[in-house]
Amino acid sequence: MLELSAVNAFYGRIQALKDVSIRVSAGEIITLIGANGAGKTTTLMSVSGIVRPASGAIMFEDRNLNEVEPDQIVAAGISHVPEGRRIFPYLTVQENLDLGAYLRRDRAAVRTDLDYVFELFPILSQRRHQPGGTLSGGEQQMLAISRALMARPRLLLLDEPSLGLAPLIVQQIFEILGQINRENGTTIFLVEQNAYMALRVAHRGYVMENGSIVLTDDSTVLLENEQVKSAYLGV
Amino acid sequence: MNYFLGLFVSGLTRGSIYALLALGYTMVYGIIELINFAHGEIYMIGAFTALILASVLSIAGLDAISILVIASLVAMIYSAAYGFTMEKIAYKPVRNSQRLSALISAIGMSLFLQNYVRLAQTSNFLPFPTLIPRLGFLQQLTFQVTSAQFVIFVTTTVVMILLTLLIKFSRVGKSMRAASQDKTMAMLLGVNVNRVIALTFVIGSATAALGGVLISSFTGQINFYIGFMAGIKAFVAAVLGGIGSIPGAVLGSFVLGWTESFGAGYISSDYEDVFAFAILVLILIFKPSGLLGRPENKKV
């Protein structure tokens, strides 16, 4: 479904991605784990067209995304929940969700999806008319995920959904990610520092260090890998 | 009492014109954090366009109301095209460079447009026809309200209401608010931010042009330099209300209009501009974010 092949990207003169190749098949949850500054966020930003690769190709269902505008990438079926959630603080919860469905014209289906996200996260329907900025961190993460789902994506990119949240909330969010994947068949590309949680929910994983992919395997294998254990799982 | 009401009405008229202009400043600032110094020139170009059209149309023998409506609409469209082009050639190329570059580009644009009109038209004052027809019912009021004052106030109110509805409830309005809060996030949701920015310039320019046509019809004369002072005043109004805030721009405009008109009426008309700028200094000292502005939120 999504294939990055030998992608190189730069911030000024600093190389953020070095020959990154990642393949995501339809229906999968894959995770990209690694330390701070490894290039995980840049990887997602390049899929969304915010960061442009200097070389290599990003293919989404046989379409090369290298030159496609960000809004057209969303239209193609890719939604991105960025690091830090980036809720519009002065827009209400409802307006944030409306913007998630910005490109859609099928009003009836948008309503169904709205009911669906309220079912996933009932707290959001209570907070519906509150400004996004007044929500707690966990609620904002739920809103960010819901907002992305409102586009009815086929591929969901998630950047550190566990960041700064209480373990119980993280647990809840990861369960719902698994649920979204099973119920709707939404493919998920998850970037995480919380390697344990990420590998438990994902089918396969990639390990990134200094802008390069150093390891890839099934999650169950990675969970047992000595290198991963000592560097990312703290055991 | 009638003297007071007269000053009140005159402040309201000034405030209305400032509001039509201040909207453009505040909307553009809200989205790209640029003070568009050439905004006053768009207002002036609107007035010139209307003048030329009004001359042609009156030769063609149209009645005053038709001339006013047609001249205003064409001036708005023509100025909107100027605003659109200005953004594309002067601001978009420098959008990702330092803020200072865009500011200098804006000042350059302002000087260019002033002198372009001076060369293309004339540097003298030109008489501007009274396009606003006489409204009989205003004669029955105990205090004086001219037809022009009345039309200016009503038009501004209608424009403000329409714009508020557009921004609050429409899809375009939501995308504008989203882009002003977080452009990258708006892009990630499928908003074409370049188009939103262009649209902001188009709307701001059209309302500025409308202001230019209305006030010129009230004052009766124009030249290439009228946009400068009006632009600065409207900028003061936008800062007063809280730059980036639309209700703030409207409130700031009326506060400024009344300050000038009461100051001129009760103290001295020689110091009219002094009052305007004194109030700017005061607001910058005591409430730098303006009357309705949001405090600058620094990211940590």
Image: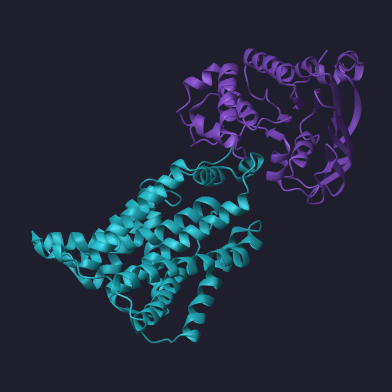
Front-most of residues A230 and A136: A136
Colour mapping: by chain
Give the image location of residue A152, x and y in percent. Answer: 66, 30
Considering only vertical position in the picture, is B273 above or below A215? below
Query: In the figure, the cyan chain has which letter?
Result: B
**Residue in front for this viewpoint, B91 or B117:** B117
Q: In which quarter of the view is residue B108 placed?
A: bottom right
Percent of width and height locating residue B52: 41, 80
Q: From the image, which quarter does the N terminus of chain A lie in? A: top right
Q: Answer with left or right where residue A87 lies relative to residue B138.
A: right
Residue B191 placement: quadrant? top right
- For the point 66% across and 58% down, the residue is B97
Position above or below: B199 against A112 = below
Residue A169 position in % (x across, y down): 62, 16
Which residue in the rendered view is the most extreme toward the front? B61
Vertical arrangement, residue B161 with respect to residue B201, above or below: above
- Residue at x 35%, y 61% (from the top left corner): B18
Image check: A185 left or right of A130? right
Q: Nearer the viewer, residue A112 or A209?
A: A112
User: From the viewer's perspective, is residue B295 above or below residue A159?
Assistant: below
Q: Position of residue B131 (x, y in %)?
A: 29, 73
Q: Is residue B257 visible?
A: no
What's the residue at 87%, 20% (across, down)?
Answer: A228
Residue B29 seen anywhere in this rendered image of the structure: yes
Left or right: B249 in relation to A131:
left
Q: Is residue B14 left or right of residue A77?
A: left
Q: In the rendered image of this protein, which colour is used for chain A?
A: purple
